[in-house]
Image (cartoon, grey):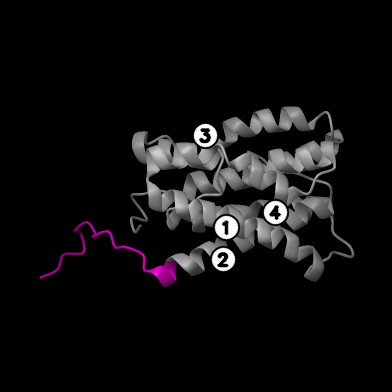
Amino acid sequence: MVSFLESPTAEQHSIFDDVQGLLVGTLLVAISVQFLQATNLFTGQIAGLSLVGAKAFDMPFGMLFFLLNLPFYAIAFARMGLMFTLKTFTAVGLLTAWSFLLPHVMTFADLHVAFAAIAAGVTAGAGLIVLFRHNATLGGVGIVAVWLQDSYGIKAGWVQLAFDVLVFALAVSFFPINAVFYSLLGAAIVNIMIATNHRRDRYIAR
């Protein structure tokens, strides 16, 4: 007889599961970037640092995002293994591709900044949770955050929020204070969603 109190057995995601997970997760994050760029907001993590850098140096977001992630792959390979590294590299590439495609098919005629911040936070949070559950990240601090959570139980959302403080400190020099406030709102939503929803005791498939 099967007891409903028994701990479930972890299952391995199929290739199809991972492909759709990477596509959906990166698309959701790319949509969040469109909300942010349409209202001159930004976010945390390497994506946020890339948005700040794109504003400061007049560079394409996708290119800067890809370049800033490169040093973190060594950490991913050493601490999380080859498959995690390959999935993360693929996710970063997909987000870069989405970021070039979406501006041609998605525009906003009238978008309130507060709604943009909330919508960006929700879509990015959902997208990152999807990626985390398929053993991938969008590189950068996400690699360190997932490793710390899986290895030491330190919640990934709080690790990312700590890094976000530095990103927002830099952003003050390039964005108006109201943009920093609304951006902080969106980033807080992202990290709260991750901290409360990405838990290995609730979702154990890999």
Q: CA distance from mark 2 to mark 1?
A: 7 Å
Q: Residue at position x 57%, y 57% from top?
A: 127
Sequence order check: which comes first, mark 1 or mark 3? 1
According to the image, label 4 marks what residue?
120
Q: Residues within 10 Å of mark 2 (few under 14, many from 20)?
A: some
Sequence order check: which comes first, mark 2 or mark 4? 2
According to the image, label 3 marks what residue?
159
Q: Judge whether residue 104 is colored magenta.
A: no
Sequence order check: which comes first, mark 2 or mark 3? 2
Q: CA distance from mark 1 to mark 3?
A: 18 Å
Observer-nearest residue: 164 or 13?
13
Sequence order check: which comes first, mark 2 or mark 1? 2
Q: Residue at position x 78%, y 49% from top?
A: 60
Q: Nearer the viewer, mark 2 or mark 4?
A: 2
According to the image, label 1 marks what residue?
127
Of all residues shown, which one is farthest toward the left?
A: 1
Q: Nearer the viewer, mark 4 or mark 1?
A: 1
- Span colored in magenta: 1-17
Q: Judge whether residue 11 is colored magenta.
A: yes
Q: CA distance from mark 2 to mark 3?
A: 24 Å
Labelled pair 2, 1 in contact (Cβ < 8 Å): yes
Does residue 203 lie above or below 40 as drawn?
below
Percent from the top left, x then y, of residue 151?
35, 37
